[in-house]
Image: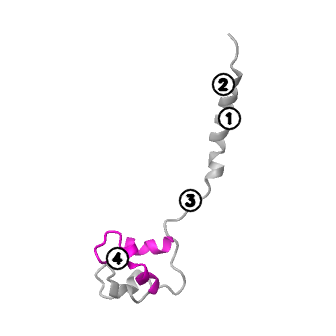
Amino acid sequence: MGTYPATDRGMRYLLLMLVSLPAFAGDPLPAASPPPPGALTFAQLDTNRDGVLSFSEAFADPRVSNNFNALDKDANGVLSPAEYQAIFAR
Protein backbone atom coordinates (compact mmCIF):
# COMPACT_ATOMS: atom_id res chain seq x y z
CA MET A 1 0.00 0.00 0.00
CA GLY A 2 1.19 3.50 -0.80
CA THR A 3 0.92 6.77 1.02
CA TYR A 4 -1.73 9.34 0.29
CA PRO A 5 0.10 12.66 -0.14
CA ALA A 6 -3.08 14.62 -0.87
CA THR A 7 -4.68 13.35 2.34
CA ASP A 8 -1.53 14.06 4.38
CA ARG A 9 -1.33 17.55 2.93
CA GLY A 10 -5.02 18.14 3.64
CA MET A 11 -4.61 17.00 7.22
CA ARG A 12 -1.63 19.37 7.66
CA TYR A 13 -3.69 22.29 6.35
CA LEU A 14 -6.59 21.37 8.59
CA LEU A 15 -4.32 21.14 11.62
CA LEU A 16 -2.68 24.46 10.73
CA MET A 17 -6.09 26.15 10.40
CA LEU A 18 -7.30 24.79 13.72
CA VAL A 19 -4.13 25.83 15.52
CA SER A 20 -4.16 29.35 14.05
CA LEU A 21 -7.88 29.99 14.52
CA PRO A 22 -7.54 31.62 17.98
CA ALA A 23 -5.04 34.11 16.52
CA PHE A 24 -7.75 35.44 14.17
CA ALA A 25 -10.55 35.40 16.72
CA GLY A 26 -9.51 38.64 18.43
CA ASP A 27 -10.70 39.92 21.76
CA PRO A 28 -14.37 39.58 22.58
CA LEU A 29 -16.29 42.83 22.63
CA PRO A 30 -17.89 43.94 25.87
CA ALA A 31 -21.66 43.65 26.08
CA ALA A 32 -22.00 47.36 26.71
CA SER A 33 -19.60 50.21 26.97
CA PRO A 34 -19.70 52.46 30.01
CA PRO A 35 -21.84 55.55 29.73
CA PRO A 36 -20.07 58.61 28.37
CA PRO A 37 -19.01 61.27 30.87
CA GLY A 38 -21.97 63.42 31.82
CA ALA A 39 -24.58 60.81 30.88
CA LEU A 40 -27.33 60.23 33.38
CA THR A 41 -27.48 56.81 34.99
CA PHE A 42 -30.60 54.66 35.03
CA ALA A 43 -31.06 55.46 38.73
CA GLN A 44 -30.82 59.20 38.06
CA LEU A 45 -33.42 58.99 35.29
CA ASP A 46 -35.79 56.74 37.28
CA THR A 47 -37.15 59.60 39.38
CA ASN A 48 -40.13 57.68 40.82
CA ARG A 49 -37.90 54.67 41.67
CA ASP A 50 -40.24 52.09 40.14
CA GLY A 51 -37.40 50.23 38.39
CA VAL A 52 -38.36 51.22 34.83
CA LEU A 53 -38.09 54.39 32.75
CA SER A 54 -41.19 56.00 31.31
CA PHE A 55 -40.84 58.29 28.31
CA SER A 56 -41.26 61.33 30.53
CA GLU A 57 -38.37 60.15 32.73
CA ALA A 58 -36.24 59.31 29.66
CA PHE A 59 -36.92 62.81 28.29
CA ALA A 60 -34.23 64.16 30.67
CA ASP A 61 -31.59 62.48 28.47
CA PRO A 62 -31.98 63.30 24.76
CA ARG A 63 -29.96 60.27 23.70
CA VAL A 64 -32.40 57.98 25.50
CA SER A 65 -35.59 59.84 24.57
CA ASN A 66 -34.61 60.11 20.88
CA ASN A 67 -34.14 56.32 20.77
CA PHE A 68 -36.91 55.35 23.20
CA ASN A 69 -39.05 53.33 20.78
CA ALA A 70 -36.04 51.48 19.35
CA LEU A 71 -34.80 50.65 22.86
CA ASP A 72 -38.22 49.47 24.08
CA LYS A 73 -37.82 45.97 22.61
CA ASP A 74 -40.94 44.50 24.22
CA ALA A 75 -43.01 47.59 23.30
CA ASN A 76 -44.53 47.92 26.76
CA GLY A 77 -44.02 51.69 26.94
CA VAL A 78 -41.22 51.64 29.51
CA LEU A 79 -37.52 50.83 29.46
CA SER A 80 -36.13 48.13 31.73
CA PRO A 81 -32.55 48.45 32.97
CA ALA A 82 -31.46 45.93 30.29
CA GLU A 83 -33.21 47.88 27.53
CA TYR A 84 -31.60 51.10 28.80
CA GLN A 85 -28.13 49.50 28.75
CA ALA A 86 -28.53 48.71 25.05
CA ILE A 87 -27.93 52.36 24.20
CA PHE A 88 -24.35 52.07 25.41
CA ALA A 89 -23.68 49.06 23.17
CA ARG A 90 -24.05 51.19 20.04
From the viewer's perspective, is the residue at label 1 or at label 3 nearer? 1
Q: CA distance from mark 1 to mark 3?
A: 26 Å
Q: CA distance from mark 1 to mark 4?
A: 50 Å
**Relative side of 44 to 23, left or right:** left
Q: Secondary structure at mark 1?
A: helix
Marker disc for residue 13: 1
Instruction: Confirm or deny contact between disc 1 and disc 4 (CB under 8 A).
Output: no
Amino acid found under the numbered disc labelled 1:
Tyr
Q: Is residue 59 above or below residue 2?
A: below
According to the picture, the residue beneath numbered tag 3 turns out to be 28
Q: CA distance from mark 4 to mark 3?
A: 27 Å
Amino acid found under the numbered disc labelled 2:
Thr
According to the picture, the residue beneath numbered tag 2 turns out to be 7
Which of the marked residues, 1 or 4, is nearer the chain's N terminus?
1
Q: CA distance from mark 2 to mark 4?
A: 57 Å
Which of the marked residues, 1 or 3, is nearer the chain's N terminus?
1
Which of the marked residues, 2 or 4, is nearer the chain's N terminus?
2
Give me the residue at 66% from left, 50% from top. Answer: 23
Q: How is the image coloured?
A: one colour
Q: Is residue 56 above or below residue 19?
A: below
Q: CA distance from mark 1 to mark 2?
A: 10 Å
According to the picture, the residue beneath numbered tag 4 turns out to be 79
Q: Secondary structure at mark 4?
A: loop
Q: CA distance from mark 2 to mark 3?
A: 35 Å
